[in-house]
Image (spheres, coloured by chain):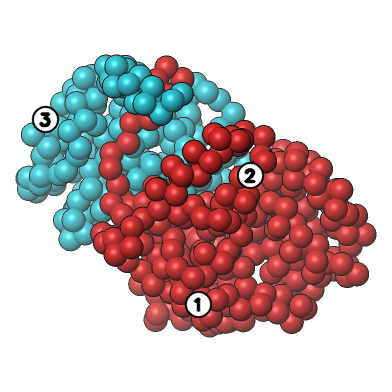
Amino acid sequence: MSQPWTPLSSHAVLVARDDIDTDQIIPARFLTTTSRTGLGTHLFADWRYDADGSAKSEFELNAPSAAGARILVGGRNFGCGSSREHAPWALSDWGFRAVIASSFADIFRSNAHKNGVLTIALPDATLAATREALQIDPHAVITVDLPSQTVTLPGGIDVHFAIDQFSKRCLIDGLDELGALLAELPAIREWEAACGH
Amino acid sequence: MLATQCLLQSKPKTMEVRVDGRLRPGVSAKDMILAIIAKIGVGGGTGHVIEYRGEAIRALDMEGRMTVCNMSIEAGARAGMIAPDMTTYAWLAGRDQAPSGDAWRDAMGRWHELATDDGATFDRSVVLDASEISPMITWGTNPGMAIPVDGRLPMSSELPDASNERAYAYMGLTPGQLLLGQPVDVVFVGSCTNGRLDDLRAAAGLMKGRRVASNTRMLVVPGSQRVKRDAEREGLADIFRAAGAEWRESGCSMCIAMNGDTVASGQYAVSTSNRNFEGRQGKGARTLLASPLTAAASAVAGMVADPRSLL
C-alpha cells in the first residue's frame, strides 16, 4: 500500500538512455527480499558502483545535484525486460515518485502505478527538449499535478499527460487494486458458477 | 489473486504476427522469435497482446510455440498467444491436470471457440516469410539486436542512436565484423525459453558423438524436474555428459546468474535464454542469445558456429 499522492515539485535526475531494462534498475542478485524498503541502495547498482563498491562519479545518480531529486527522466521504452516489482520498489525507496520517459514497458508501468510511482510518457520532441534543459541546469524544477494530469517542465511549459483513470485514482488515494477487485466479487462468483467451477 | 482468483487487466490492443511458409532445416522457433523482435524492435509490441499465426506457426510443436510466446515480452508485448488446434489438444491429452472423458470433450469444444475468426482485423499486423529466416544470434544488450548467425554486425551509420555504441563497447565487438568464429567461453542450454525436452533433444542430437571444445564450458539445465527425468530416461543426459557438458538440476541457473551460475566479466556466453541485458548473466558478462542448435554447435566449435554446417 502506498501513501496518498501529495503535490510533487522537484528537480530531476536525467539518465539519458533508451531501453533501460529492469536488470539495470535492480540487478537480479538483489531480488532475494520481499520487503519494499532498503532496495534504494541497489538502484542501478551495476551502473552506479565499481567492483569494489565505490560510487562511480560519472553515473548520474552519484552527481551531487541528484540528492533529493524525486523525479527520474529516462528515454524510450523505460523498464523493459523482466517483470520485477522490485524495480519500482527500488526507485521509490531511493526517493523517486515519478519517472518521465517517451514510452514505458507495459509491465513496468503497471507495477510502478501499483507501487506509488507515477509514469509520465511525453512525446519524443518534448522529452528531448526536457533532457536538453536538464543538461543545462540539473537543478531545474519539474512540477507534476496528477489530478489535472499536467506536468510543468523546465521553462514553465505545461504538458498534459495520459494515465488510465483507475491507476490515477489508486495513486491519488494510495490504494491498490485488491479493494477494487473485491467489490466485483458477486460478478466473479456469477461467472465462475456459469463456467461450472 | 488469492482473494479473488482474478487479476485486473486493461484491455490491450491486438497485434497479429503472421509467419508464412516453412522454416528451413537448422532454423527453429527461437530463431523465428529473434527474427520477429529484430524486425519490430524491443518496444514493437508495447500496449499489445500478440497473436502468432500463419503456416509456420501452425507447423510448430507445442514446445516451439511456448518458446515463441515466451519472448513476446522481449518485443514489449503484454503477452503472446497461438490459437488452440489439434497440436494443442494432442499435447494436453492425458496430462496431469487435463480433464478426461466427457469433461475433455466439453473442454475441447470451448477451446475451439477461442480461436480468432477468419477475416478478423488487428490493431497492427506484421508479416514474415519463414523461409527467409536464418539461425539468429544477438550481438548487443537487448534482444532486438540480432543478426543471422552468418551475418555481419550493423555498421555505425546504420544505427539509429547512441545506445548501440554503448552496446558495442559493453560487448567488446566492432561494427561490420562477423560473429561466426567469435570464441565462446560458456554455452548455456536451458531456461523457460529453451529448457524443454525438445530443446534438449535438438541440442543432444547435434552433440552426439562430438565433444565440447576445450576452451568452452557448457551447462545444460533442464527446465523442470519432469524434463530432467524424461531427458535422463531418453539418454539425453548421457549424451551431454559424454560430450563433456555439465548436466545440472533444473532451475533458472545462468539465465539470471542464479545459484552461483554466473558468466565472468568480459566472457562471452552463447545462451538459449531470453535476455541479454548488461549484467544479466553476471556483472560484465557478454550474452549472445541463440537457439539450442546454435548453442550446441558453438559449444562443439568453441566459437560462434552455424548449426547448419553440423547437421
Identify the element where label 1 is drawn: loop
User: What is the chain letter for disc 2?
Assistant: B
Q: Residues within 10 Å of mark 2 (few under 14, many from 20)?
A: few
Q: Given this view, does label 1 or label 2 mark the residue nearer the observer?
A: 2
Residue that badge 1 annotates: B21
Callout 1, which amino acid?
Gly
Q: Residue at 20% of width from left, 37% of height from top? A: A164
Q: CA distance from mark 1 to mark 3?
A: 51 Å
Q: Colour of chain B?
A: red
Query: In the image as oriented, which residue stretches furthest toward the front?
Result: B102
Residue B140: where, in percent of width, then height?
Answer: 53, 65
Locate the C terminus of chain B and report the quarter of the image it occupies: bottom right
Q: Quadrant of residue B26?
A: bottom right
**Is any atom of residue B46 visible in this view?**
no
User: A53 or B229, which is in the foreground?
Assistant: B229
Callout 3, which amino acid?
Pro
Locate the N terminus of chain B and report the quarter of the image it occupies: top left
Q: Quadrant of residue B298?
A: bottom right
**Is any atom of residue B14 visible in this view?**
yes
| Chain corresponding to cyan in the figure | A
User: B139 or B65, which is in the foreground?
Assistant: B65
User: B92 or B198, which is in the foreground?
Assistant: B92
Q: Is residue A43 above or below residue B60?
A: above
User: B240 or B117, which is in the foreground?
Assistant: B117
Q: Residue at 61% of width from left, 59% of height from top? A: B61
Q: CA distance from mark 1 to mark 2?
A: 28 Å
Residue that badge 3 annotates: A147
Q: Which mark is residue B93?
A: 2
In the rendered structure, which disc, 1 or 2, sits on the residue that comes first in sequence? 1
Q: Residue at 63% of width from left, 44% of height from top? A: B93
